[in-house]
Amino acid sequence: MSKNVKLVGVGGQGTILSTKILTQALLNAGYDVKMSEIHGMSQRGGSVSSDIRFGDHVSSPVVEKGSADFLVAFEQMEAVRYLDYLKPGGILIVNDLKINSMLTQAGKVKYPEDIIEYLKTRENTYIFDATSVATKLGNARVLNIVLLGTLVKAMGLENLPIEKAIEDLVKPRFIDINKQAFNIGLSMM
C-alpha cells in the first residue's frame, strides 16, 4: 500500500527543497518513491505544488484529487486551493501565513479573512506558525523544514534519515539551522 503526500506553497518558500529532502530520506529508508513537481510562475510568487508517493511499489508520481493522505500548505490560500486533493480523513498541515498575490497587492482581489477558521472546521487539521518559529531560529526561510518536521511526525516516520538528506541536499552553511528547524517541527506535532 502506498501513501500520498502533497506539498503546496508559493514560489520562494522552499516547497521543492522540502520535497527533495523527504524523497531522498524515503529512498534511503528503502521505500519505492515517485515524486513530481509543478513550478508554474513560482519565480514570480506563484503557486508551487509537489507530489510524493511512496510504499512497497508505486507506479505513478501523481497524487490525484481526493487521494492525498497528507497535505502540507506553506501558506493559507494554498491550503484552500489544494484542499480537494486531500482524501477524507487525511491530515492537513497549514502554515498560518498570508502572502498577498499580485492581484491582492493591486487591490483587485481581497485576501479572505476567515481561511484559518474555515480550515479548522475540518478534522485532522493542524495549524502552525512555522514562519515565526523559523524567524526565531534566525532564518525565516527554514519554515519549510519546520513544516517538514511536523509532516514526518504526522506520518509516524520519525526514524527517517532526514538529517542525512539535509546534509546531502542543503548548502553546508545552512545544514545546522535546517536540522534544528526539522527537530523543532518534529516536537511541534
Image (cartoon, rainbow, N blue to C red):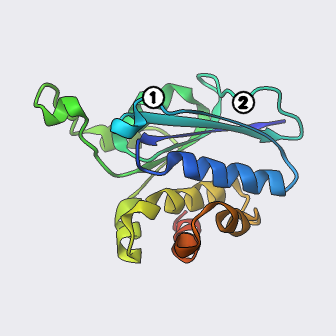
Q: Earlier in the sequence, mark 1 or mark 2?
A: 1
Q: Nearer the viewer, residue 116 or 24?
A: 24
Under circle 2, the secondary element is: loop
**Disc 1 residue crowd, few under 14, some 14–19, many 20+, Cα 10 Å:** some
Q: Is residue 180 visible?
A: no
Which residue is under mark 2? Answer: 61
User: Image quarter for residue 133?
Assistant: bottom left
Q: Residue at x 83, y 27 (%)?
A: 59
Position of the N terminus by quadrant: top right
> Looking at the image, is 177 positioned above or below residue 56?
below
Q: Amino acid at mark 1?
A: Gly
- How far across and how far down the image is residue 26, in percent? 77, 52
Between the residue at mark 1 and the residue at mark 2, the CA separation in whole angstroms equals: 18 Å
Position of the C terminus by quadrant: bottom right
User: Image quarter for residue 186?
Assistant: bottom right
Q: Residue at x 10, y 31 (%)?
A: 107
> Looking at the image, is 178 positioned above or below residue 109?
below
Which residue is under mark 1? Answer: 40
Under circle 1, the secondary element is: loop
Q: Is residue 146 visible?
A: yes
